[in-house]
Image (cartoon, grey):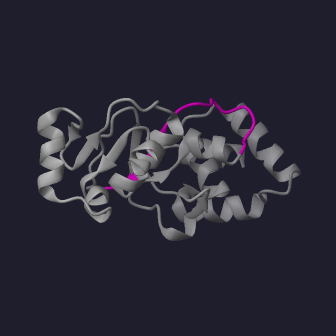
């Protein structure tokens, strides 16, 4: 119940088993309606408030996901980015569906671009800026980068270096960020 409470009512099968539940106990809860099947290997326990943070915690736990894009910007306290969205990124060939979550897929999200914030894996500040470049207008993106540089949370050199390493044809936001830089 504690796990589900932290994850806006969601619990993965493997989490329930790790907490000491048996397969039979899970089946009984599903049959009685105490648990609902959200998707294979993911259950929902009715009665918990659903929050974007809880949804992201559930997605991270169930999908090998990393909090990214607007959600990472909110966690990193970026100014001027829409708040309250639940957005994660998963590796390619990983399931891309989770109730209430916007799921992106990426082949280039490696551990060097991931940090832990409040126990959740979140894209680093430079990687978050690169992800936001795909969905943010150039003027707004430029203002965001300026603010992060002024606050000593980012350097243009670091952002340009990471951008150069991740840029490729077809990567969303690559051209826009190059223009802003």
Q: Is residue 88 magenta?
A: yes
Inspect the magenta stretch and tell me whether residue 32 lies in it: no
Q: For this view, does 35 lie left or right of residue 4? A: left
Instruction: Pick whichever, 117 or 166, lies toward us.
Output: 117
Where residue 15 appears, x then y in whole percent?
Answer: 32, 58
Depth check: give the residue in front, 77 or 165.
77
Q: Main secondary structure of the magenta part?
A: loop
135 left or right of 34 in image: right
- Count how many numbered circles sit on residues in the image: 0
Residue 24 drawn at (x, y percent): 11, 54
Indicate the quadrant where residue 124 lies: bottom right
Question: In the image, what residue occupies the spot 18% across and 60% down?
Answer: 22
Can residue 153 be seen?
Answer: yes
Q: What residue is rendered at 88% in x and 50% in y?
A: 150
Residue that lies at the very extreme toward the right in this rendered image = 150
Residue plotted at (31% across, 56% down) = 92
Tell me if residue 171 can be seen. Answer: no
> In the rendered structure, which segment of residues is drawn in magenta?
77-92
Compared with 135, 2 (above or below) is below
Left or right of 80? Residue 116 is left
Toward the bottom, the furthest residue is 112
């Amino acid at each position: 119940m504690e796990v589900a409470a932290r994850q806006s009512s969601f619990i993965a099968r493997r989490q329930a088993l790790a907490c000491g539940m048996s397969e039979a106990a899970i089946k009984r809860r599903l049959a009685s309606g105490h648990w609902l099947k959200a998707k294979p290997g993911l259950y929902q326990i009715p009665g918990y408030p659903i929050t974007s943070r809880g949804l992201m915690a559930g997605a991270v736990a169930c999908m090998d996901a990393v909090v990214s894009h607007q959600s990472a910007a909110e966690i990193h306290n970026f100014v001027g980015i829409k708040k309250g969205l639940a957005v994660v990124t998963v590796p390619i060939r990983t399931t891309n569906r989770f109730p209430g979550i916007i799921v992106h897929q990426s082949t280039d999200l490696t551990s060097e671009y991931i940090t832990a914030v409040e126990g959740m894996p979140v894209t680093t500040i430079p990687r978050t800026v690169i992800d936001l470049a795909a969905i943010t207008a150039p003027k707004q993106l430029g203002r965001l980068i300026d603010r992060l540089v002024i606050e000593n949370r980012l350097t243009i050199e670091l952002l340009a270096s990471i951008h150069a390493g991740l840029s490729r044809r077809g990567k969303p936001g690559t051209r826009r960020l190059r223009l802003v830089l």
